[in-house]
């Protein structure tokens, strides 16, 4: 039963959540002449649990949205190279420019999200903070607005032609439109534990380099941030997050076990408290229906080990807004545009999603991986970087020829465990074939888990320990997705 609402307003589109995806969608709609209200529970500047590494492809999305000028005012270090090291092999690569931008940045979320919200306001978006959406309003089977509680605790109703849920992984809009249960997903094996510190390398070339040092099953990383700070991050087995949370011991041991990282951050002071999470399952939800759409993490999430979420939330939020703006007044055309935007997101994210699932395996770098890195490490041309930068899909960079060369080299090494190498190469090849076959067949929504996916994932992730595993075949309930839409996507 709906709470009677004292205040009813109308607008063209209401966006729930106003960080990456929400601001991007709202900006695109407003720039195209639409009246947009964006509601967020948060009061900005506001933090959220996320690291925030952006490659040139992500920075170019900030530029397209008109946010880059505000980011530039923060004077963030512009990194132009990445160093990735494992098993004594170092790969150092530059970045391919995207839209003329050849650098990445790592701006903490309070500043990044505040810049997004301020830019949205500059384009005329009515951003309302400390407003919590409690209900989607329906009319003749279509989403027709939302009911929310404002900063003073008053219940208000906003009627709109389009409701966009850009409200993150635990999206309440997804739940209200019946799309809460992802139609496919994969359990993460890695967790994240990170801190900010003063960077002892201020004034050196290290401020322009992002590092990922792999030791055992854990990646140790360091990203330079504005104001002489840096973000230091461990991504290792998710089960180890409770050890990080138990005390400083674990952090200190992980630094000591990673000599390259220890040298990079030696002398760092002024560390913040630890931030951590073991829950980063990847998924796709049905993301469009009559009068509604899900943007950013609300609709799709990839493992953070590949640092793609912000870029994708910005890009597909913007594309969604651009697709919807011209057809908002025609419900049939609007729903078709929302579905097309969803299909485009899925097409563009599919390969990267599988790559993220594979990178989330918490395994020590195998001799095969180390030999592949040796092949990439011969030049500083952007190869691996192009996958992070979305210039080339992962399988065009880490292709069978590289795999074959790495295998031959690994087999030739004295003392090589040939059976283990051949088994690994065989299993990786099967995964490659599976991903390619899925793309060629266009069967992404058929819900058959691919070999890259660990089907024993749970939803919601926070309830993982209590919850029954959700089989990946479980269809989304309620109004999403309708059969014709699924057929069209498949
Ligand atoms: C630990 C971790 C590390 C990550 N590291 C990286 C990285 O290095 N690089 C990268 O690109 N990506 C990274 N990501 C992914 C990235 O954080 C997300 O993809 C990105 O934040 C998605 O933005 P969004 O706008 O969809 O959602 P969010 O940033 O989650 O924003 C959702 C907003 O919705 C609001 N909201 C929720 N419910 C309601 C409601 N009912 N009413 C009103 N408002 C509501 C919330 O207050 C919030 O402000 C990481 C993610 C995690 C978890």
Image (cartoon, rainbow, N blue to C red):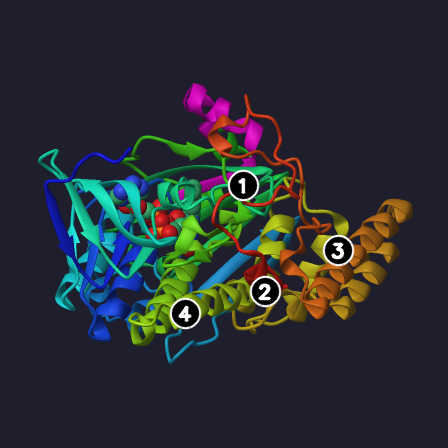
**Could you give the CA–CA distance between mark 1 and mark 4, rounded to whole angstroms?**
34 Å
Residue 280 lies left or right of residue 189; in this view the side is left
Depth order, front residue of 359/309: 309
Q: Secondary structure at mark 2?
A: helix
Classify 3 as above or below 358. Answer: above
Q: Are marks 4 and 2 in contact (CB under 8 Å)?
A: no
Q: Secondary structure at mark 1?
A: loop
Q: Residue at x 52, y 66 (%)?
A: 343
> Which residue is farthest top?
246
Asked if residue 103 can be seen in this view, the reply is no
**Could you give the CA–CA distance between mark 2 and mark 3, rounded to whole angstroms?**
23 Å
Q: Position of residue 115 (x, y in %)?
A: 20, 58
Among numbered discs 4 and 3, the one appearing first in the sequence:
4
- The quadrant of the image that shows the N terminus is top left
Q: Position of residue 323 (x, y in %)?
A: 37, 72
Residue corresponding to mark 3: 431
In this view, the mark in front (4 or 3): 4
**Could you give the CA–CA distance between mark 1 and mark 3, rounded to whole angstroms?**
19 Å
Q: Position of residue 62 (x, y in %)?
A: 31, 67
**Could you give the CA–CA distance between mark 4 and mark 3, rounded to whole angstroms?**
39 Å
Q: Are marks 2 and 3 in contact (CB under 8 Å)?
A: no
Residue corresponding to mark 1: 281
Residue 470 lies left or right of residue 95; in this view the side is right
Q: Are marks 1 and 2 in contact (CB under 8 Å)?
A: no
> Which residue is farthest bottom?
100
Q: Is mark 3 within 8 Å of ligand 1?
A: no
Residue corresponding to mark 4: 332
Q: What's the mark number on residue 489?
A: 2
């Amino acid at each position: 039963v709906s709470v009677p609402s004292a205040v009813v307003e109308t607008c063209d589109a209401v966006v729930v959540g106003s960080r990456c995806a929400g601001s991007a969608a709202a900006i695109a709609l407003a720039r195209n002449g639409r009246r947009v209200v964006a509601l967020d529970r948060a009061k900005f500047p506001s933090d959220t649990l996320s690291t925030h590494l952006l490659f040139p492809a992500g920075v170019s999305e900030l530029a397209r949205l008109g946010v880059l000028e505000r980011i530039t005012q923060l004077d963030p270090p512009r990194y132009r190279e990445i160093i990735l090291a494992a098993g004594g092999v170092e790969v150092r690569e530059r970045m391919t420019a995207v839209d003329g931008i050849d650098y990445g940045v790592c701006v903490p979320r309070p500043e990044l999200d505040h810049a997004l919200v301020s830019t949205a306001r500059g384009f005329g978006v009515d951003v309302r903070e400390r407003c919590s959406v409690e209900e989607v309003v329906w009319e003749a089977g279509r989403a027709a607005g939302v009911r929310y509680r404002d900063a003073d605790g008053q219940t208000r109703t906003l009627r709109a032609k389009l409701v966009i849920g850009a409200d993150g992984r635990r999206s309440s809009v997804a739940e209200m439109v019946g799309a809460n249960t992802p139609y496919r997903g994969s359990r993460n094996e890695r967790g994240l534990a990170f801190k900010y510190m003063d960077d002892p390398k201020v004034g050196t070339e290290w401020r322009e380099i992002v590092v990922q040092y792999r030791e055992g099953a854990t990646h140790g990383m360091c990203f330079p941030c504005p104001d002489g700070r840096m973000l230091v991050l461990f991504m290792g087995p998710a089960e180890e997050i409770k050890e990080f949370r138990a005390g400083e011991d674990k952090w200190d041991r992980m630094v000591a076990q990673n000599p390259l990282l220890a040298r990079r951050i030696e002398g760092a002071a002024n560390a913040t408290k630890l931030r951590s999470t073991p829950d980063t399952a990847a998924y796709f939800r049905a993301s469009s229906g009559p009068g509604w759409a899900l943007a950013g993490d609300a609709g799709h999430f990839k493992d953070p080990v590949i640092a793609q979420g912000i870029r994708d939330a910005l890009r597909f939020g913007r594309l969604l807004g651009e697709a919807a703006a011209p057809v908002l007044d025609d419900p049939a055309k609007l729903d078709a545009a929302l579905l097309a935007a969803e299909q485009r997101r899925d097409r563009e994210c599919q390969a990267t999603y599988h790559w993220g699932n594979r990178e989330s395996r918490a395994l020590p770098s195998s001799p095969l991986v180390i030999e592949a890195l040796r092949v990439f490490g011969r030049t500083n041309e952007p190869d691996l970087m192009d996958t992070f930068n979305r210039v080339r899909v992962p399988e065009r960079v880490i292709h069978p020829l590289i795999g074959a060369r790495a295998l031959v080299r690994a087999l030739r090494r004295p003392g090589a465990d040939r059976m283990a190498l051949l088994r690994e190469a065989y299993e990786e090849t099967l995964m490659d074939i599976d991903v390619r076959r899925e793309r060629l067949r266009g069967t992404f929504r058929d819900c058959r888990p691919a070999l890259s996916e660990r089907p024993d994932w749970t939803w919601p992730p926070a309830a993982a320990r209590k919850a029954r595993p959700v089989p990946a075949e479980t269809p989304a309930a309620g109004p999403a997705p309708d059969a014709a839409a699924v057929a069209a996507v498949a």
